[in-house]
Amino acid sequence: MAHDVAALAVELTDMAAADHQSAIRANSDDPAEQLVWRRLTARHGDRLGEIMDEYGWPTAEMVGEEAARAAWLIAQHADRQLDVQRRALKLMQQAVSAGSASPRELAFLRDRTMVNEGRKQVYGTQIAGVTDGSPIPWPCEEPERMDELRAEAGIEPFDKYVTKFAMP
């Protein structure tokens, strides 16, 4: 089992590295580039589904911090596989309750899944676009409580967060 878990950790971190390298293609104007991204994230989503079947949620205690974060990233980018995102969300919620996963990452995954389901997000982590240089979040359930809820999940205030997305 220890060898399997070590191999799993390497596999997850390799998948995250491939994700990072390919992410620039996600919003490309070239449909072929977008297709490369979609195929990669679908393959990774399928594999994460298999991993969750066999191991449950890959926590830091199981696979190490880097590989656990990689599993979250893969779930986060499985946008066309809501079944995978929903399962990851459920397993990650249990892991957070047990103190073995990041509430911040869970908040991001929750928002991403809700937006993909066509629902309003909670934490304002998902940006719909940029208008006149200002990032605009997808609609939120309680916009007036967004920063309070973000703080509870360990996420910086929205105004500070969106500086990463602002266009000069």
Image: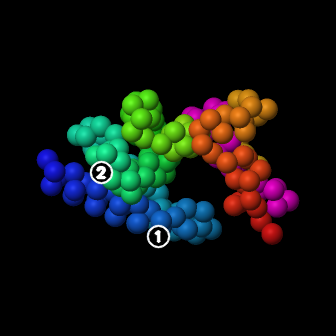
**Mark 2, other Cα within 10 Å: few <14 / some 14–19 / many ≥20:** many
Give 52 or 31, whichever is nearer the viewer. Answer: 52
Q: Can you name the residue that lies furthest to the right here? A: 132
Residue 78 visible? The answer is: no
Q: Which mark is residue 21?
A: 1
Query: Where does label 2 land, which residue?
Result: 63
Determine if residue 155 is in view. Answer: yes
Q: Nearer the viewer, residue 118 or 139?
A: 139
Determine the image quadrant of residue 138.
top right
Q: Mark 1 belongs to which amino acid?
A: Gln
Say if the magenta span includes residue 122.
Answer: yes
Residue appearing at x 38%, y 50% in the figure: 68
User: Which residue does the image show at 40% across and 66% down from the upper left?
Assistant: 18
Magenta span of residues: 114-135
Residue that appears at 85% across and 59% down: 132
Q: Which mark is residue 153?
A: none
Kind of residue at badge 2: Val
* Percent x, y of residue 3: 15, 55
Relative to 81, is 118 above or below? above
The quarter in which the C terminus is drawn is bottom right
What secondary structure is marked by label 2?
helix
- Horizontal and vertical percent position of residue 1: 14, 47
Other residues around mark 1 within 10 Å, as few (<14) / some (14–19) / many (≥20): few
Q: Nearer the viewer, mark 1 or mark 2?
A: 2
**Marks 1/2: CA distance?**
22 Å
Q: Is residue 42 magenta?
A: no
